[in-house]
Image: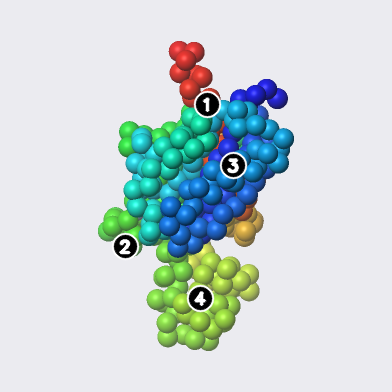
Amino acid sequence: MKSGEYIIGYDVGGTKIGIGLASRDGKLIGHDRIENKDTHSDDILPQLVSSAKKLVKEANLKMEDLAAFGISAPFPADAVNGILTAPTNNKKWRNVPIKKYLMDNLGIDGHFENDANCGALAEWFFGAGRGCTDFIYLTMSTGIGGGIVAAGKLVRGKLFNAGEIGHTVVELNGRQCNCGMKGCYEAYAGGRAIAMRLQEELKDQPDHPIVKFAGGKLEDIDMVALEKAVRINDPYALKIWDEMSLRNAQAFGMLLNIFNPQRLILGTLAWAVGDLYVDPIKKYLPQFAWKENVECCEIVPSELRRDIGYYAGPAAAINYLNEKEAAIRL
Ligand SMILES: [Zn+2]
């Protein structure tokens, strides 16, 4: 591979930063991680640079071989200027100009992108989205984030807010969501929202199987405890699971009829739980989308799974370079 056909990327999470060195044709050739819980950016930024240099050296490359860096960033952020303004997962990082810092210290161009979009890009270049022109990636974790690729392009929207699928309203005057609105899809199917609901509804039932699966502690009730109760056919757990599946199908149906994707790629819960998660959604989907759009779309779990953080940053860099080259061709 020629000089300039490698990229480096960073996934800035609340507990760790994943760093990946990759080739532009979709191979991860080195990775590293930096612990990032309760850190100050002044301590971490220099480590981002030294880690990149270490990975480049270990791969027998030179810094000149890198074409760009990518940053997969938590929002809210100033995407245009590449500033982490107020990440909710790290209270001590405020107005950190991470893009400029890396440009100055790595000596290469770079790009800053919403982390849910980077998840989609990672699957596009390295995982279950390879070769697709139209697909949607959904995080399906404590919250529900998403990234949309339509007609071979990442959809960002005017304010870089496109893909906030978890905050489409699926119920009029419905459940209160973290975002301030009522009735958001995430308030019905996000892992955190479901756990909060279970904790509230089971507070007077210490002997309930879900509470027992959470080690007897109400505050430890999570999706794992719920899944275990579903697998033993507990009626209440089955009811909650069914409601969740119906809401997932409702949201997916909207996506299918709006974007007509060839694939929906699902993160965490889909690969952690498996068929028990995906099959009921498929059962309900025909209620919410046209038959041909349902038949056209494969629902698959993420290929990159828990390693997606190593791919997210490099994927942002690859997409940046691709978009830049396409703009030059126009
Ligand atoms: Zn919301």
To which residue does mark 1 refer? 321
Distance (Cα) linking label 1 and label 3: 19 Å
To which residue does mark 2 refer? 176
For label 3, the SS is helix
For label 4, the SS is helix
**Along the polypeptide, which appears first: circle 2 or circle 3?**
3
Picture disc at residue 220:
4
Left or right position of 160 against 308:
left
Q: Residue furthest top?
A: 330
Relative height, residue 327 to residue 8 (above, below) = above
Please identify, in this view, whether the residue under mark 1 or under mark 4 is nearer the observer.
1
Relative height, residue 223 to residue 6 (above, below) = below
Looking at the image, do the residues carrying marks 1 and 4 touch, with CB atoms under 8 Å apart? no
Amino acid type at image mark 2: Gln
Looking at the image, do the residues carrying marks 4 and 2 touch, with CB atoms under 8 Å apart? no
Left or right position of 99 against 291:
left
Residue situated in front as seen by the camera: 26 or 35: 35
Badge 3 density bin: few <14, some 14–19, many ≥20, Cα 10 Å = many
Please identify, in this view, whether the residue under mark 1 or under mark 2 is nearer the observer.
1
Q: Quadrant of the N terminus?
A: top right
Residue 302 point in image, percent of width and height = 61, 47
**Along the polypeptide, which appears first: circle 1 or circle 3?**
3
Looking at the image, do the residues carrying marks 3 and 4 touch, with CB atoms under 8 Å apart? no
To which residue does mark 3 refer? 52
Residue 256 point in image, percent of width and height = 48, 39
Label 3, ligand 1: CB separation under 8 Å: no
